[in-house]
Image: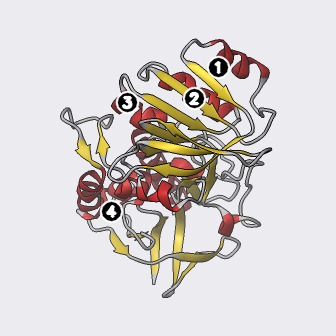
Protein backbone atom coordinates (compact mmCIF):
# COMPACT_ATOMS: atom_id res chain seq x y z
CA UNK A 1 0.00 0.00 0.00
CA UNK A 2 1.27 3.49 -0.85
CA UNK A 3 1.38 6.34 1.67
CA UNK A 4 2.21 10.03 1.41
CA UNK A 5 4.38 9.77 4.53
CA UNK A 6 5.85 6.77 6.31
CA UNK A 7 7.09 7.55 9.82
CA UNK A 8 9.62 5.15 11.32
CA UNK A 9 9.38 5.35 15.10
CA UNK A 10 6.70 6.13 17.68
CA UNK A 11 8.39 8.27 20.30
CA UNK A 12 7.68 12.00 20.77
CA UNK A 13 9.29 12.86 17.41
CA UNK A 14 7.39 10.32 15.34
CA UNK A 15 4.02 10.87 17.00
CA UNK A 16 4.25 14.65 16.77
CA UNK A 17 5.17 14.34 13.09
CA UNK A 18 2.14 12.07 12.56
CA UNK A 19 -0.16 14.58 14.19
CA UNK A 20 1.01 17.30 11.80
CA UNK A 21 1.07 15.21 8.61
CA UNK A 22 -2.37 13.70 9.20
CA UNK A 23 -3.86 17.10 10.01
CA UNK A 24 -2.42 18.25 6.67
CA UNK A 25 -4.49 15.41 5.13
CA UNK A 26 -1.46 13.39 4.12
CA UNK A 27 -1.97 9.64 4.19
CA UNK A 28 0.34 8.67 7.04
CA UNK A 29 1.69 5.34 8.30
CA UNK A 30 3.48 5.06 11.65
CA UNK A 31 5.71 2.00 11.96
CA UNK A 32 5.83 1.86 15.73
CA UNK A 33 8.30 -0.93 16.38
CA UNK A 34 7.68 -3.65 18.94
CA UNK A 35 6.78 -1.18 21.71
CA UNK A 36 4.84 1.96 20.73
CA UNK A 37 5.97 5.02 22.66
CA UNK A 38 9.73 4.62 22.59
CA UNK A 39 12.08 5.22 25.53
CA UNK A 40 9.53 7.08 27.63
CA UNK A 41 7.57 3.87 28.07
CA UNK A 42 10.25 2.77 30.55
CA UNK A 43 10.57 6.16 32.24
CA UNK A 44 8.80 6.85 35.51
CA UNK A 45 8.38 10.50 36.52
CA UNK A 46 8.56 13.14 33.78
CA UNK A 47 8.58 16.65 35.26
CA UNK A 48 10.09 18.66 32.42
CA UNK A 49 7.48 18.24 29.69
CA UNK A 50 5.31 21.36 29.16
CA UNK A 51 1.66 21.13 30.16
CA UNK A 52 2.16 18.82 33.14
CA UNK A 53 2.95 21.04 36.15
CA UNK A 54 2.46 18.14 38.56
CA UNK A 55 4.60 15.81 36.44
CA UNK A 56 3.44 12.77 34.51
CA UNK A 57 4.43 9.12 34.23
CA UNK A 58 6.30 8.30 31.01
CA UNK A 59 3.79 5.64 29.84
CA UNK A 60 0.86 7.98 30.55
CA UNK A 61 2.47 10.78 28.53
CA UNK A 62 3.11 8.45 25.60
CA UNK A 63 -0.41 7.02 25.75
CA UNK A 64 -1.75 10.57 25.33
CA UNK A 65 0.69 11.20 22.46
CA UNK A 66 -0.34 7.98 20.71
CA UNK A 67 -4.01 8.97 20.95
CA UNK A 68 -3.28 12.45 19.63
CA UNK A 69 -0.88 11.23 16.95
CA UNK A 70 -3.51 8.87 15.51
CA UNK A 71 -6.54 11.09 16.16
CA UNK A 72 -6.53 12.68 12.70
CA UNK A 73 -6.28 9.49 10.67
CA UNK A 74 -2.70 8.27 10.93
CA UNK A 75 -2.44 4.49 10.71
CA UNK A 76 -0.18 2.78 13.24
CA UNK A 77 1.30 -0.68 12.82
CA UNK A 78 3.18 -2.51 15.59
CA UNK A 79 5.93 -3.63 13.22
CA UNK A 80 9.72 -3.41 13.25
CA UNK A 81 11.50 -2.01 10.21
CA UNK A 82 14.10 -4.44 8.86
CA UNK A 83 15.31 -2.67 5.71
CA UNK A 84 14.74 0.37 3.51
CA UNK A 85 15.29 1.21 -0.15
CA UNK A 86 15.63 4.94 -0.61
CA UNK A 87 16.93 4.61 -4.18
CA UNK A 88 13.54 3.52 -5.47
CA UNK A 89 10.61 5.84 -6.10
CA UNK A 90 8.35 5.57 -4.22
CA UNK A 91 10.55 4.69 -1.27
CA UNK A 92 10.29 1.13 0.06
CA UNK A 93 10.20 0.28 3.76
CA UNK A 94 10.18 -3.41 4.73
CA UNK A 95 9.15 -4.64 8.18
CA UNK A 96 8.91 -8.02 9.84
CA UNK A 97 5.37 -8.29 8.43
CA UNK A 98 5.29 -6.54 5.06
CA UNK A 99 6.63 -3.91 2.65
CA UNK A 100 5.21 -0.40 2.31
CA UNK A 101 5.62 2.37 -0.26
CA UNK A 102 5.98 5.99 0.71
CA UNK A 103 6.26 9.19 -1.29
CA UNK A 104 8.26 10.53 1.66
CA UNK A 105 9.73 9.09 4.86
CA UNK A 106 10.35 10.61 8.28
CA UNK A 107 12.99 8.74 10.28
CA UNK A 108 12.33 9.04 14.02
CA UNK A 109 13.81 5.76 15.21
CA UNK A 110 15.64 7.32 18.17
CA UNK A 111 18.79 6.32 20.00
CA UNK A 112 19.42 3.95 22.86
CA UNK A 113 21.66 4.69 25.83
CA UNK A 114 24.60 2.35 26.14
CA UNK A 115 24.29 0.36 29.36
CA UNK A 116 26.75 -1.66 31.41
CA UNK A 117 24.90 -4.89 30.67
CA UNK A 118 24.26 -5.81 34.31
CA UNK A 119 21.07 -7.59 35.36
CA UNK A 120 20.96 -5.49 38.54
CA UNK A 121 21.33 -2.30 36.51
CA UNK A 122 18.30 -3.10 34.37
CA UNK A 123 16.25 -4.20 37.40
CA UNK A 124 16.75 -0.77 39.00
CA UNK A 125 16.29 1.45 35.96
CA UNK A 126 13.95 4.24 36.98
CA UNK A 127 14.56 3.35 40.64
CA UNK A 128 17.86 5.17 41.00
CA UNK A 129 19.58 4.06 37.79
CA UNK A 130 19.43 6.53 34.92
CA UNK A 131 21.23 7.53 31.73
CA UNK A 132 20.00 11.14 31.64
CA UNK A 133 21.05 13.71 34.24
CA UNK A 134 18.96 16.44 32.64
CA UNK A 135 15.88 14.23 32.91
CA UNK A 136 16.36 12.82 36.40
CA UNK A 137 18.91 14.92 38.30
CA UNK A 138 16.20 16.86 40.13
CA UNK A 139 15.13 13.71 42.00
CA UNK A 140 18.54 13.38 43.69
CA UNK A 141 18.63 16.53 45.81
CA UNK A 142 21.01 16.09 48.71
CA UNK A 143 21.95 12.55 47.69
CA UNK A 144 25.23 10.88 46.78
CA UNK A 145 25.54 9.76 43.17
CA UNK A 146 27.88 7.62 41.09
CA UNK A 147 28.50 8.54 37.45
CA UNK A 148 29.99 5.80 35.28
CA UNK A 149 32.14 6.88 32.33
CA UNK A 150 35.28 8.73 31.34
CA UNK A 151 34.40 10.93 28.38
CA UNK A 152 33.07 14.45 28.01
CA UNK A 153 29.54 13.14 28.42
CA UNK A 154 30.37 11.72 31.86
CA UNK A 155 32.00 14.99 32.94
CA UNK A 156 28.99 16.99 31.73
CA UNK A 157 26.58 14.69 33.57
CA UNK A 158 28.64 14.87 36.76
CA UNK A 159 28.94 18.66 36.67
CA UNK A 160 25.21 19.04 36.05
CA UNK A 161 24.39 16.67 38.91
CA UNK A 162 26.41 18.78 41.39
CA UNK A 163 23.48 21.23 41.30
CA UNK A 164 21.44 18.66 43.20
CA UNK A 165 23.68 16.01 44.75
CA UNK A 166 25.72 16.36 47.91
CA UNK A 167 28.52 14.33 46.29
CA UNK A 168 29.25 12.89 42.85
CA UNK A 169 31.73 10.06 42.33
CA UNK A 170 32.95 9.44 38.77
CA UNK A 171 34.01 5.83 38.22
CA UNK A 172 36.08 5.04 35.12
CA UNK A 173 37.42 1.60 34.25
CA UNK A 174 40.69 2.91 32.73
CA UNK A 175 43.62 4.80 34.24
CA UNK A 176 43.19 7.62 31.71
CA UNK A 177 40.10 9.65 30.95
CA UNK A 178 38.90 10.23 27.38
CA UNK A 179 37.39 13.59 28.26
CA UNK A 180 38.85 16.80 26.85
CA UNK A 181 41.35 18.63 29.06
CA UNK A 182 38.99 21.50 29.82
CA UNK A 183 36.09 19.22 30.84
CA UNK A 184 38.41 17.03 32.90
CA UNK A 185 39.80 20.06 34.72
CA UNK A 186 36.33 21.38 35.51
CA UNK A 187 35.35 18.06 37.01
CA UNK A 188 38.60 17.64 38.97
CA UNK A 189 38.39 21.16 40.36
CA UNK A 190 34.80 20.81 41.57
CA UNK A 191 34.61 20.34 45.33
CA UNK A 192 31.64 17.97 45.11
CA UNK A 193 33.26 15.59 42.60
CA UNK A 194 35.57 12.67 43.37
CA UNK A 195 37.17 10.73 40.51
CA UNK A 196 38.09 7.04 40.65
CA UNK A 197 40.37 5.49 38.00
CA UNK A 198 40.65 1.77 37.21
CA UNK A 199 37.20 1.28 38.70
CA UNK A 200 34.30 -0.56 37.12
CA UNK A 201 30.79 -1.15 38.43
CA UNK A 202 30.05 -4.88 38.48
CA UNK A 203 26.76 -4.76 40.38
CA UNK A 204 24.13 -2.24 41.44
CA UNK A 205 22.98 -2.94 44.99
CA UNK A 206 19.43 -2.63 46.33
CA UNK A 207 16.01 -4.24 45.91
CA UNK A 208 13.40 -1.54 45.34
CA UNK A 209 15.86 1.35 45.02
CA UNK A 210 19.58 1.91 44.58
CA UNK A 211 21.44 1.53 47.87
CA UNK A 212 24.97 1.16 46.54
CA UNK A 213 27.26 -0.35 43.93
CA UNK A 214 29.96 -2.97 43.92
CA UNK A 215 33.20 -1.55 42.57
CA UNK A 216 35.95 -3.69 41.06
CA UNK A 217 39.52 -2.49 40.66
CA UNK A 218 40.35 -3.32 37.03
CA UNK A 219 44.05 -3.77 37.86
CA UNK A 220 43.98 -5.79 41.09
CA UNK A 221 40.54 -7.41 40.80
CA UNK A 222 39.67 -6.26 44.33
CA UNK A 223 35.96 -5.66 44.92
CA UNK A 224 34.29 -3.39 47.47
CA UNK A 225 30.81 -2.13 48.24
CA UNK A 226 30.19 1.59 47.93
CA UNK A 227 27.11 3.33 49.30
CA UNK A 228 25.20 5.57 46.90
CA UNK A 229 21.60 6.54 46.17
CA UNK A 230 21.90 6.96 42.43
CA UNK A 231 23.81 5.60 39.43
CA UNK A 232 24.05 7.55 36.18
CA UNK A 233 25.49 5.59 33.27
CA UNK A 234 27.27 7.97 30.88
CA UNK A 235 29.08 5.75 28.38
CA UNK A 236 27.41 7.11 25.28
CA UNK A 237 24.36 6.54 23.10
CA UNK A 238 23.81 4.34 20.06
CA UNK A 239 21.51 5.89 17.43
CA UNK A 240 19.25 3.39 15.68
CA UNK A 241 20.68 3.98 12.22
CA UNK A 242 22.10 0.59 11.25
CA UNK A 243 19.52 -0.04 8.50
CA UNK A 244 20.12 3.38 6.91
CA UNK A 245 23.85 2.90 6.33
CA UNK A 246 24.55 2.92 2.60
CA UNK A 247 21.20 4.64 2.05
CA UNK A 248 21.80 7.97 3.81
CA UNK A 249 24.78 9.98 4.98
CA UNK A 250 25.61 8.90 8.55
CA UNK A 251 28.13 10.91 10.57
CA UNK A 252 31.13 9.49 12.44
CA UNK A 253 29.10 9.17 15.65
CA UNK A 254 26.48 7.09 13.85
CA UNK A 255 23.74 9.75 13.69
CA UNK A 256 21.82 10.67 10.53
CA UNK A 257 23.50 13.65 8.88
CA UNK A 258 21.10 16.54 8.30
CA UNK A 259 21.10 19.58 6.06
CA UNK A 260 18.91 22.49 7.02
CA UNK A 261 17.29 21.12 10.20
CA UNK A 262 15.50 17.88 9.17
CA UNK A 263 16.53 17.33 5.54
CA UNK A 264 18.78 14.33 4.92
CA UNK A 265 21.12 13.53 2.05
CA UNK A 266 18.22 12.01 0.06
CA UNK A 267 15.41 14.25 -1.17
CA UNK A 268 12.12 13.22 0.37
CA UNK A 269 13.70 11.60 3.44
CA UNK A 270 13.48 13.62 6.63
CA UNK A 271 14.57 12.95 10.19
CA UNK A 272 13.65 14.02 13.71
CA UNK A 273 14.60 13.36 17.32
CA UNK A 274 17.46 11.45 18.90
CA UNK A 275 18.31 9.59 15.69
CA UNK A 276 20.03 12.79 14.50
CA UNK A 277 20.35 14.72 17.78
CA UNK A 278 23.39 13.87 19.88
CA UNK A 279 23.23 17.09 21.88
CA UNK A 280 19.85 17.62 23.54
CA UNK A 281 18.13 14.21 23.68
CA UNK A 282 14.95 15.49 25.34
CA UNK A 283 11.33 14.55 24.72
CA UNK A 284 10.36 18.16 24.16
CA UNK A 285 13.11 18.81 21.59
CA UNK A 286 12.28 15.53 19.82
CA UNK A 287 8.63 16.61 19.60
CA UNK A 288 9.68 19.97 18.17
CA UNK A 289 11.83 18.25 15.55
CA UNK A 290 8.90 15.99 14.69
CA UNK A 291 6.83 19.08 13.95
CA UNK A 292 9.63 20.49 11.78
CA UNK A 293 10.07 17.25 9.84
CA UNK A 294 6.33 17.03 9.19
CA UNK A 295 6.16 20.59 7.88
CA UNK A 296 9.25 20.03 5.72
CA UNK A 297 7.82 16.81 4.26
CA UNK A 298 4.43 18.43 3.55
CA UNK A 299 6.10 21.35 1.74
CA UNK A 300 8.34 18.99 -0.22
CA UNK A 301 5.40 16.85 -1.30
CA UNK A 302 3.49 19.95 -2.39
CA UNK A 303 6.40 20.99 -4.60
CA UNK A 304 6.53 17.53 -6.18
CA UNK A 305 2.86 17.78 -7.14
Q: Of label 4 and label 1, which has the lower sequence position?
A: 4
Q: Is residue 294 left or right of residue 244?
A: left
Q: Which mark is residue 187?
A: 1
Residue sitting farthest toward the left: 54
Question: Dot 4 lies on which element?
Answer: loop
Q: Tell me, yes or no, whether the two marked residues, 2 and 1, touch with CB atoms within 8 Å.
A: no
Q: Is residue 272 visible?
A: no
Say which residue appears at 53% left-offset and 36% top-offset: 280
Give me the C-alpha separation between circle 2 and circle 1.
10 Å
Say which residue appears at 41% left-offset and 31% top-offset: 137
Say which residue appears at 37% left-offset and 60% top-offset: 37
Q: Residues within 10 Å of mark 2 (few under 14, many from 20)?
A: some
Q: Decide which of 187, 223 is in the foreground and name it.
A: 223
Of circles 4 and 1, which is in front?
1
Of circles 2 and 1, which is in front?
2
| Residue that carries the numbered disc 3 in the rendered image | 140
Q: Residues within 10 Å of mark 4 (few under 14, many from 20)?
A: few
Q: Which mark is residue 169?
A: 2
Question: Dot 3 lies on which element?
Answer: helix
The relative height of residue 92 versus residue 128 in the rendered view (above or below) is below
Give me the C-alpha separation between circle 4 and circle 2.
52 Å
| Residue that carries the numbered disc 4 in the rendered image | 25
Amino acid sequence: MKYDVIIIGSGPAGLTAAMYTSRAELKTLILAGATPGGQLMITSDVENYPGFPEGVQGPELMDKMIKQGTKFGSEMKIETVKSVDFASKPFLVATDKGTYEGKSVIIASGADARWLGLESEQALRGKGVSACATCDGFFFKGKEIVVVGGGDGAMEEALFLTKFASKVTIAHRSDTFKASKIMLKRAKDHQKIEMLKNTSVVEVLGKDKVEGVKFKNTQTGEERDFKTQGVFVAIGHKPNTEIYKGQLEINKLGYVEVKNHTITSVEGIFTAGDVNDSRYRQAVTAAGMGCMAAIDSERWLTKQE
